[in-house]
Image (cartoon, rainbow, N blue to C red):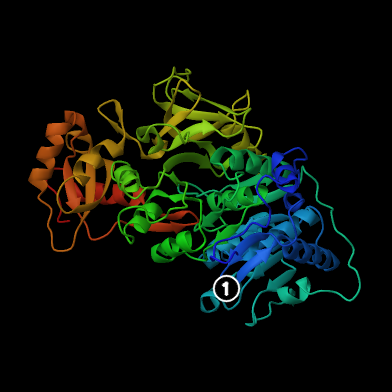
């Protein structure tokens, strides 16, 4: 860091070393090669304990790779990486890249059933965890896993002073010992190959058991280079604040994209709006990406004006569609350039980015143009199977050389998600634009089919959110005596009550008759589930509630 407290990358802007490191002339094909060319004293990552330089990260990840190999890990093995956003997460991932070992990231909030599923399905041979984190929660969960579900597990690596209770038949060692300097030179490990699987991510599995997505070293590093160029991270003086867990596709992509650009990455172990606002100023952060509600929460704790003078953009994913109409003017009032993005576990995050110079109306929406120069997309009618012209809504299909290679041990699912000509079916509704970009509308499973029409719930929610006292709104479809109708749920400000009659009148005045909700229910809070990219509303729970509260006579149960 420089004297002002802001991060100093250590590479003078415009210097030969800087240009060579970021030009892509010698593009890396393995993750650990992304560190090549960066000066030893340049800041790579900043955690709660301070900055870690590229030189230190190179040395410690190389020593970790050598010692893990000595402990028996080999190319093709899998390691469960069960840590929060700390530098050691990256040290382990880079060491595994050297070994040719695939990383299986696990959220630190997972329970025994979820951990057992991942350890068993991915046949993990090792796990890295911090036994003292969250009062030992991860260690407790690991002990609760049935030994039959962790049959392949042979090694537990622990961070910190706390000890994990030993598991029968499983060796245990300390992370600090594995990265410690050696009096004798350690053999250099570079067994990993570009085509090796480097990352295995679980899909959300909201309607079925999660599928395990496989990404390779070469595709990950190439995508990181494409994404870094698309968001402007390759420019001088840039840096990124990461408030999303690296265990998910979004957070992981942001991390490797920043490393590929060889720019400082500032980590948050957990997202707290006040802390994010402080770090943006303290480190002179130029780039941040996250969910739309993250930005909304940050802007709610800072004064109006331009509280973040160095911030060049906030890239958002539309996880909270109801903020689509609220967030753009709020971000503009605070001097924050808003850019929408689109991605999925199978392509990683940032498959597409809205142009930085596009009108706010477009930048405020999810989607964008593919960041990979050779990628493209198209839109298909899900009912007829016909390809649709620009501007018509259908299922988005994408093709990119950086996509996953397939689902682990699931050739049927892999075949089903890819078309014969290599496009990936996203499961998302959107429409294509004339410049080759797209606008994301919603997940197919969230779209309402009303009176033969496809209805985006956002259209209804925007009307209701404009009403006094309404803070949150979600809309689902449910069977009523008159057929399938929209049902809306709202959360009200403390001390206010829903005037349902007035809300329905507002909907009738602004929406087509088939879009007007049959009922609007006020509830205390939305049912949500925590995920690696933030909390998501459980639409299936709302649908069940709507069905239960609508009686055959058309009357309703008490909300």
Task: Using the rendered view, name the quadrant where residue 382 is placed.
Answer: top left
The answer to whether one can see residue 88 in this image is: no
Bin the neighbour count of mark 1 within 10 Å (Cα to Cα): few under 14, some 14-19, many 20 and up.
some
Above or below 86: residue 328: above
Q: List x then y, in percent, for residue 492.
A: 19, 56
Above or below 286: residue 142: below
Q: Number of marks in the image?
A: 1
Q: Nearer the viewer, residue 496 or 234?
A: 234
Q: List x then y, in percent, for residue 531.
A: 47, 56
User: Which corner quadrant holds the C terminus?
Assistant: bottom left
User: Helix, strand, or loop for circle 1?
Assistant: helix
Q: Nearer the viewer, residue 335 or 165?
A: 335
Q: Which residue lies under the disc numbered 1? A: 144
User: Which corner quadrant holds the N terminus?
Assistant: bottom right
Identify the residue shown where x is 75% and y is 40%: 27
The answer to whether one can see residue 243 in this image is: yes
Identify the residue shown where x is 72% and y is 39%: 24
Q: List x then y, in percent, for residue 209.
A: 53, 50
Q: List x then y, in percent, for residue 426.
A: 51, 35
Q: Is residue 424 left or right of residue 496?
A: right
Above or below 532: residue 232: above
Q: Nearer the viewer, residue 150 or 198?
A: 198
Q: Is residue 44 left or right of residue 280?
A: right
């Amino acid at each position: 860091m420089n004297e002002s407290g802001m991060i100093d990358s250590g590479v003078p802007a415009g210097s030969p070393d800087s240009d060579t490191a970021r030009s892509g002339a010698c593009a890396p094909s393995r993750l650990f090669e992304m560190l090549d060319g960066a000066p030893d004293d340049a800041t790579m990552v900043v955690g709660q304990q301070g900055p870690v330089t590229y030189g230190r990260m190179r040395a410690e990840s190389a020593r970790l790779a050598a010692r893990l190999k000595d402990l028996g890990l080999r190319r093709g093995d899998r390691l469960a990486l069960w840590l929060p956003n700390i530098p050691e997460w990256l040290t382990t991932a880079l060491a595994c890249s050297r070994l040719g070992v695939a990383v299986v990231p696990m959220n630190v909030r997972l329970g025994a059933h979820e951990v057992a599923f991942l350890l068993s399905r991915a046949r993990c041979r090792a796990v890295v965890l911090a036994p003292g984190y969250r009062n030992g929660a991860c260690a407790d969960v690991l002990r609760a896993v049935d030994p039959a579900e962790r049959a392949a597990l042979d090694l537990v690596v622990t961070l910190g002073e706390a000890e994990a209770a030993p598991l029968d038949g499983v060796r245990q060692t300390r992370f600090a010992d594995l990265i410690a300097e050696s009096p004798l030179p350690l053999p250099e490990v570079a067994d990993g190959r570009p085509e090796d699987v480097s990352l295995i991510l679980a899909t959300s599995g909201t309607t079925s058991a999660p599928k395990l997505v496989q990404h390779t070293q070469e595709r990950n590093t190439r995508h990181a280079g494409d994404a870094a160029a698309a968001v402007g991270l390759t420019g001088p003086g840039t840096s990124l604040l990461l408030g999303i867990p690296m265990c998910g596709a979004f957070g992981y992509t942001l991390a490797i994209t920043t490393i590929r650009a060889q720019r400082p990455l500032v980590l948050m172990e957990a997202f707290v709006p006040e802390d994010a606002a402080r770090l943006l100023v303290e480190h002179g952060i130029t780039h941040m990406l996250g969910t739309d509600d993250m930005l909304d929460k940050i802007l709610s704790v800072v004064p109006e004006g331009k509280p973040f003078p160095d911030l060049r953009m906030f890239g958002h994913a539309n996880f909270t569609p109801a903020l689509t109409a609220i967030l753009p003017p709020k971000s503009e009032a605070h001097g924050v350039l808003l850019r929408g993005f689109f991605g999925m576990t199978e392509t990683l995050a940032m498959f597409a980015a809205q142009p930085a110079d596009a009108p706010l109306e477009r930048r405020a929406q999810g989607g964008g143009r593919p960041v990979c120069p050779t990628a493209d997309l198209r839109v298909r009618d899900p009912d007829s199977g016909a390809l649709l012209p620009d501007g018509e809504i259908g299922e988005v299909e994408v093709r990119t050389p950086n996509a996953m290679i397939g689902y682990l041990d699931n050739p049927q699912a892999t075949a089903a998600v890819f078309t014969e000509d290599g496009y990936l079916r996203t499961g998302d509704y959107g429409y294509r634009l004339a410049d080759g970009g797209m606008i994301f509308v919603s997940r197919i499973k969230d779209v309402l089919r009303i009176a033969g029409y496809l209805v985006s719930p956002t259209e209804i929610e925007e009307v209701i959110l404009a009403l006094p006292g309404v803070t949150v709104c979600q809309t689902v479809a449910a069977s009523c005596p008159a057929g399938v109708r929209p049902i809306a749920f709202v959360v009200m400000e403390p001390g206010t009550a829903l005037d349902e009659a007035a809300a329905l009148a507002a909907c009738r005045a602004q929406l087509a008759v088939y879009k007007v909700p049959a009922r609007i229910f006020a509830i205390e809070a939305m049912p949500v589930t925590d995920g690696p990219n933030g909390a998501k509303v459980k639409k299936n729970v709302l649908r069940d509630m709507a069905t239960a509260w609508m009686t055959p006579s058309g009357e309703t149960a008490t909300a």
